[in-house]
């Protein structure tokens, strides 16, 4: 994950059309963000208020925004700054209903974000998964179906094609205890975490022979970076871990019931996907003007050049994210001299062209949600100490064929550092016989909802086929701390 900043596109979306003013706003905004004086939403909200009425900011002695407020006033006097109208597309007046799974455990902010999303003029249907929590634009755990020719970059997410991948090996689960040092070494040797991480050696880099890497200027500019980061993972909740997989007889085709050694990974499209997301989100916000509360839900039309470019780049990011996982799993399998019995995987930050139950063609955005069409396999992880599950979708129409993508956070990273005691985390990991390599308090099991409660809330959406219990968990080192 790249370090958070406030882009020129986000400032332009407030109505700034003067280059000198844009530079001044950017300098102040990013200075405040870098020095942690305010968080990003507070800064943008203040900038928007300042544009509407700069005088209170100009009169405040020692105020953080005093200088740029005075600049706005001066430019207006000279007739050089006329605020651009920001609201072109109005939200629907009526609030459409949408299902909320596990509503008793979902924060008000996530519900408010979903209500705004469902009022977009292009919105067709929506649903909120039981792991939902407040995000950027669309809430994490939000599912939004829009008209077929529209796509919302921030409803896909910044980490395009963040996904799960599970390899099942024909070895008993007890291997984790009998060969623990060897399995730890395999993780440490073949996984690489952090913003600038590179693997340095590749199992299969044939994806980069694809012509799509030359399709647009933006993709071409990111190809080398993507190549260097092939087979690596990000920060935050990204992980690669060994665990015990319990499968009932007949649950997974071709695999007898029993307890198996399994490898599970969670990560996405690295700097490539993040750069694509930010670049096209800025374009969307410039072209699709929306009320303040909905501006990060700006969309692109697939029939336009930039819409077509984003669609192509998003799908390439999906294939790249898959290749990242395969690099890790294949390298480890090769060193073990074993082929996995099966590999199960799925995206959970993506957009798909689908049809609703009535045949309506739509674009389905799943931001932190697992595809759960009838018969579709997926993986829903818990936390570093609680189980994850292999599931089969039931094709529930009201959920737009979706399920949760995990347990969902109950507190921010900064709150975790302030409230969670390290000795309690150590005790929890010791009790569950979990070896942790990397990570910090912000990913402690206590920051997540109870995965069993989450699974119970989506009983109508998926069938559970197998349970995965983490035992050796590899995450980014504490120094690689993501922003909230």
Image (cartoon, helix red, strand yellow):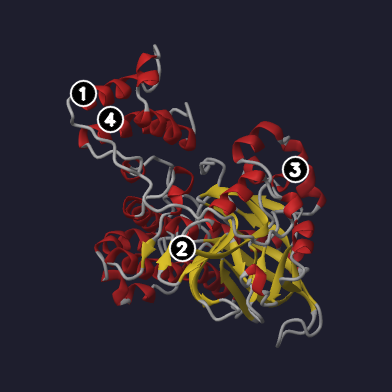
Instruction: Residue under label 1, please give it.
Output: 77
Q: CA distance from mark 3 to mark 2?
A: 48 Å
Q: CA distance from mark 3 to mark 4?
A: 47 Å
Q: Nearer the viewer, mark 3 or mark 2?
A: 2
Q: Nearer the viewer, mark 4 or mark 1?
A: 1
Whichever of callouts 3 and 4 sits on the residue coming sooner in the sequence is: 4
Q: CA distance from mark 2 to mark 1?
A: 39 Å
The reply, left or right, for residue 131 in relation to residue 309 is right
**Residue at left offset 72%, top offset 82%:** 252
Q: CA distance from mark 4 to mark 1?
A: 18 Å
- The local crowd at label 1, few if under 14, some if 14 to 19, many if 20 or more residues have their Cα within 10 Å, is few
In depth, the one of 308 and 265 nearer the eye is: 308
- Name the secondary structure under disc 1: helix
- The local crowd at label 4, few if under 14, some if 14 to 19, many if 20 or more residues have their Cα within 10 Å, is few
Instruction: Residue under label 2, please give it.
Output: 122
Instruction: Residue under label 4, please give it.
Output: 24
Whether residue 161 is situated above or below residue 32 in the rendered picture: below
The reply, left or right, for residue 218 in relation to residue 178 is left
**Residue at left offset 63%, top offset 77%:** 373
**x and y, in percent, of residue 297 in the image:** 45, 54
Q: CA distance from mark 4 to mark 2?
A: 35 Å
- The local crowd at label 3, few if under 14, some if 14 to 19, many if 20 or more residues have their Cα within 10 Å, is few
Instruction: Residue under label 3, please give it.
Output: 426
Q: CA distance from mark 1 to mark 3?
A: 62 Å
Disc on res. 433: none
């Amino acid at each position: 994950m790249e370090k958070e900043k406030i882009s020129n596109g986000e400032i332009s979306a407030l109505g700034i059309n003067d280059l000198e003013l844009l530079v001044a706003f950017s300098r102040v905004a990013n200075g405040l963000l870098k020095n942690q004086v305010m968080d990003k939403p507070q800064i943008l909200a203040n900038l928007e208020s300042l544009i509407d009425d700069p005088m209170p900011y100009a009169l405040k002695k020692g105020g953080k925004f005093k200088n740029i407020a005075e600049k706005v006033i001066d430019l207006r006097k000279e007739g050089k700054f006329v605020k651009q109208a920001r609201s072109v597309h109005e939200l629907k007046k009526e609030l459409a209903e949408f299902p909320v799974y596990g509503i008793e455990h979902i924060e008000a902010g996530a519900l408010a974000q979903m209500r705004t999303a469902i009022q977009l003029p292009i919105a067709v249907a929506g649903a909120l998964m039981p792991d939902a929590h407040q995000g950027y634009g669309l809430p994490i755990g939000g599912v939004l179906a829009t008209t077929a020719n529209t796509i919302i970059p921030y409803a896909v997410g910044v980490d395009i094609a963040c996904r799960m991948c599970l390899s099942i090996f024909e070895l008993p689960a007890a291997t984790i205890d009998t060969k623990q040092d060897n399995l730890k070494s395999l993780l440490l040797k073949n996984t690489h975490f952090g913003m600038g991480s590179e693997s340095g050696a590749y199992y299969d880099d044939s994806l980069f022979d694809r012509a799509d890497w030359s399709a647009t200027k933006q993709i071409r500019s990111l190809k080398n970076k993507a190549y260097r980061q092939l087979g690596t993972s990000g920060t935050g909740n990204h992980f690669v871990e060994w665990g015990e997989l319990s499968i009932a007889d007949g649950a997974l085709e071709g695999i007898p019931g029993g307890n198996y050694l399994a490898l599970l990974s969670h990560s996405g499209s690295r700097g490539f996907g993040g750069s694509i997301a930010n670049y096209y989100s800025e374009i969307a916000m410039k072209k699709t003007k929306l009320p303040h509360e909905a501006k990060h839900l700006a969309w692109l039309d697939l029939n336009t050049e930039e819409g077509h470019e984003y669609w192509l780049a998003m799908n390439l990011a999906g294939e790249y994210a898959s290749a990242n996982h395969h690099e890790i799993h294949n390298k480890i399998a090769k060193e073990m001299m074993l082929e996995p019995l099966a590999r199960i995987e799925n995206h959970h930050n993506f957009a798909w062209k689908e049809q609703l139950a009535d045949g309506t063609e739509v674009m389905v955005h799943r931001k932190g949600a697992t595809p759960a069409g009838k018969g579709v396999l997926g993986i829903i992880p818990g936390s570093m100490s609680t189980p994850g599950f292999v599931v089969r979708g039931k094709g529930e129409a009201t959920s737009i064929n979706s399920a949760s993508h995990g347990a969902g956070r109950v507190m921010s990273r900064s709150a975790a550092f302030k409230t969670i005691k390290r000795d309690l985390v150590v005790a929890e990991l010791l009790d569950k016989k979990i070896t942790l390599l990397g990570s910090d308090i912000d990913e402690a099991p206590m920051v997540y909802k109870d995965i069993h409660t989450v699974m119970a809330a989506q009983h109508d959406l998926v069938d559970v086929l197998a349970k995965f219990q983490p035992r050796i968990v590899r995450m980014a080192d504490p120094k690689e701390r993501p922003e909230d």
